[in-house]
Amino acid sequence: MVSDLPGNRYWFCRPQNQKEPTRFLFVGSKADGNDVDRILLIFSEYGSVEAVVKHPSSPYVYFVIFQEAGHAKTALANVGGLNLHSHGFTSIKYAEARVIEDQAITEQDTQLQQEKTVYSASETGIPGLFLLYDFINSEEEELLLSSLDHEEDSNSATSKSHYPDDSSFKRFESQLKASESMNIALGTWERVSKRRVQHFGFRFDYATRSFSSSLGPLPPLIADVAEKISKLPEVGMPLDQVTANDYAPGVGLAPHIDTHFAFTGPIISLSLGSHCTMELKKGVESSSSGTTPALESDSRGEEGQPSSTEVSSCLLFLPRRSLLILSGESRYAWQHGITAWKSDMFHGQSLERQRRVSLTLRKVRGYACDCDYPKCCDSQEAPLVPTRLATKISTVSSVNMSTDHNNRAADLSAEHSNALCSEYASLGDKDRNLPAGSCTRHPSVIATEIASEAALKQLELDHVVDVYDAIAQHFSATRFAIWPKVKEFMDLLPKGAVVADVGCGNGKYFGVRDDVAVIGSDRSSGLASVAGRRLEAVGMVGSHFTPGAPPGADVFVADALSLPYRPSSCDAALCIAVLHHLSSAARRLKLLEQLILLLKPGGQAIVTVWATEQEEPEKTVKKWTLILPSSNGHNAEAIPPLLQQGSGGGDNGYFSTSKSRASGSGSCEETERSRFSEESRTEERTGKVQAPTASGGADYFVPWNLPCHRAEAQGALNAGKMKIDKAKGSVVFQRYYHLFTKEELSGLVATMPNAKILDVFYDKSNWCIVFEKTSNSVN
Amino acid sequence: MKLLTHNMLACHIKGVKNNFPFMIEVTKVETCDADYDPEFLRHMFPRIVWPAFLQGAEQMGCRDGLPEAATEEMLQEDTFLKKFHHALLEVRLQEGALVCPETGRKFPVSKGIPNLLLTEDEC
């Protein structure tokens, strides 16, 4: 956040050591309107208050600036703690503030400007790049700018609708609101140092580096612009995600490639209010390697990252009101950034830069990218560069202390955070031309094999465990995004909570909070050892990790169907993208029962699974191999009688929880989730079920392509009988997935007498459920 | 494996009654520095089964300075907290085994990671 204060401009962030008093206090308020006067009155009792500053976009967040840290400490002691709520506050913490310094333009820059600046797309010679002058007129520009400044208020006001409305979450709502506000605020300041942003169409969560729920339709004026742009021949597709970036003069953006799997099609930027100079660089520069944690360094080596020798660059002058289109090679294989200059070169003349608002328009993708630039593609050969580091930057805001202008790596990683959660996309899905049944055995053969529990186990061994063991490194390199809904769940846990992360994969949730102990387990020893490296790396000398982060994290190898957690020992359980790998309803239920067993009474679990309702089925399920419906006989056999009644009936007892929740959710809710619950209610009424099996779901083989040049691919090749995709140069693994319907998931949980469903929701092609072990249950 | 984790584990072999805590067979222990956070320790303390923790600490060779019975009051003492912190989080079993107290079944710990998979007839 940038706030004007007498003499200085500040931006705030979270201090490295939250217990060390500073003279700045972050204050989360419950008040809906302007709370500055009241806050000033309350806090002035404890010392001399220099100013109370409103957060520019969150109506709940204020910063109190004392003259001395001692005063802030007294105020925190008196207004915080037990007195917090009686004062109408949700949170008070120390904050840190930095003065924004002016950056002078150097002679070197001037020379660079003169030599390298070009004024048209054709001069750059970059394929797919277009620059349209005067795309809008000055009246339209004025209207957009004023609307954006206005939109800012209304946008944050609607942020209330993100929160769960279930009564069991009510008590946490205000805390959640405050913590989230702080995260957003911190994310805004930290990640690009000095620019402000707002999002339309899809909300972007800086703390988790991925998109969360849809924000609904674009605001009318922005929708008009998006539509006009989408009709350009250079674009030719609808655009659904818009980010406004507000750059003060002298503020830049480090060169980066927008994450491939997050967005499809061109990236478009409309310059409002001022010109600027864009920097373009070919390929993936290796400059960030120095700041990449050692954890990832070896896998990066294997990836054969493009060398920096191929990099060529240029400077492109972007006039005010111009439209820049990055498509094809310029989008996928060139980095773009904004120079951090206060003036730009225009045909030999230096022009002072003003406040510039860039409207970036994109099309959200939810599946793997298969562009022709595999070396630059995070869905293909290029790893998503900053994994652990990036997570730390966004979740632990202390890293935003490194605010120097040259901190390219931090900016780069933040920009890479323009990523949908990869967990929920079918990554590496490159063998789309392969015929169905390209796995080592034909599905119909498998269908006849699946007759017994032993066969089910074998199926999971062959098509889940062995695959993850084989692809662990490669898989891990693509899985770092912290899913917002999981983070929200974890944010509500008490300090010192013990969290069982069942099917922890590469352990990406270990460090989300450093004041809880995440004890992970995975059936795949390959993944467990990848997760184990996370524990060693923490606190490493010279690493960029927050020293001492996840103090309590640990990992072991175990089968989720027989877990060794001490009964009732855990405050919470995570089971993220695991349950869908189990091959019968009985086995799925058994896993859920294991979660209940390890939870304390009152402890909560979050379980996510892939949904039958994939957001872009033509990119996902239609490319996967449906295991023949007849093969689902095993499901019918293994399902408890209650579950066999089918999801179409609607009046089965086990629907009651989700139904009452749906009806209690009110009619004005506008979230993605409620639209889906509306649909499923309709389904229930009409008895229309799209899924082929009695239990509502469907079984698929989902391919994973492991590039042949990777070391672990050699092992798989030597073992023989692996399918090779010669065109893609990869080994094709098939993973077993059971796609769930909502009723199926909630039905399974509802079968357990000591589980109480708190929330069931859809997000990004997944069904998610939060449930609690009832307090009267005994193990 | 940390003693914190050891405290949250119980032998899961089917039918085993005396399942907690696992005995620890030590081949190699390593000590890694972890950030000392008294608040975290105070929150974690009530979740720890103390006698099991002591037994684990004894076997891992870091029992020294940990009292037979720990009380909430001790959580205000820095000297106690530091010992607790060290044994709970910093001392790690790298190589060895977790041994079921009833059946004597050994679950190997290799490169710091216990393998707690059961055989067919154990589940």
Image: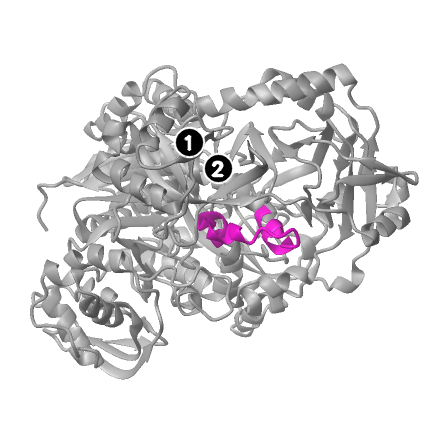
For residue A185, the mark is 2
Judged from this view, the residue extending furthest toward the right is A348
Give how far across and how far down residue A542 sits, in percent.
Answer: 51, 69
**Residue beneath the point at 37% across and 25% down:** A677
**Residue A725 location in percent, x, y?**
63, 59
Left or right: where A267 falls relative to A80: right
Q: Identify the amino acid type marked 2.
A: Ala
Marks 2 and 1 close (CB-CB < 8 Å): yes
Task: Please identify the residue farthest to the bottom as the structure is shown.
Answer: B27
Label 2 vs label 1: CA separation? 9 Å
Identify the main secondary structure in magenta. Answer: helix
Where disc 2 sits, the SS reads helix
Pick whichever, A536 or A343, lies toward us: A343
Horizontal relation, residue A318 to residue A564: left or right: right
The residue that appears at 58% across and 62% down in the rendered structure is A291
Q: Quadrant of residue A338?
A: top right
* Crowd around label 1: few <14 · some 14–19 · many ≥20 (10 Å): many
Q: Disc 1 is attached to a residue of which chain?
A: A
Highlighted range, magenta: A391-414
Give the residue at mark 1.
Answer: A61
Of residues A736 and A334, which is closer to you in this image?
A334
Q: Residue at x 34, y 32 (%)?
A: A43
Number of numbered discs on residues: 2
Within 10 Å of the Cα at label 2, are there few (<14), some (14-19), or many (20+) other Cα atoms? many
Image coordinates of residue A456 in percent, x first then y, are 33, 55
Residue A346, image quadrant: top right
Relative to residue A710, is residue A95 depicted above or below? above
Q: Is residue A689 above or below residue A305?
A: above
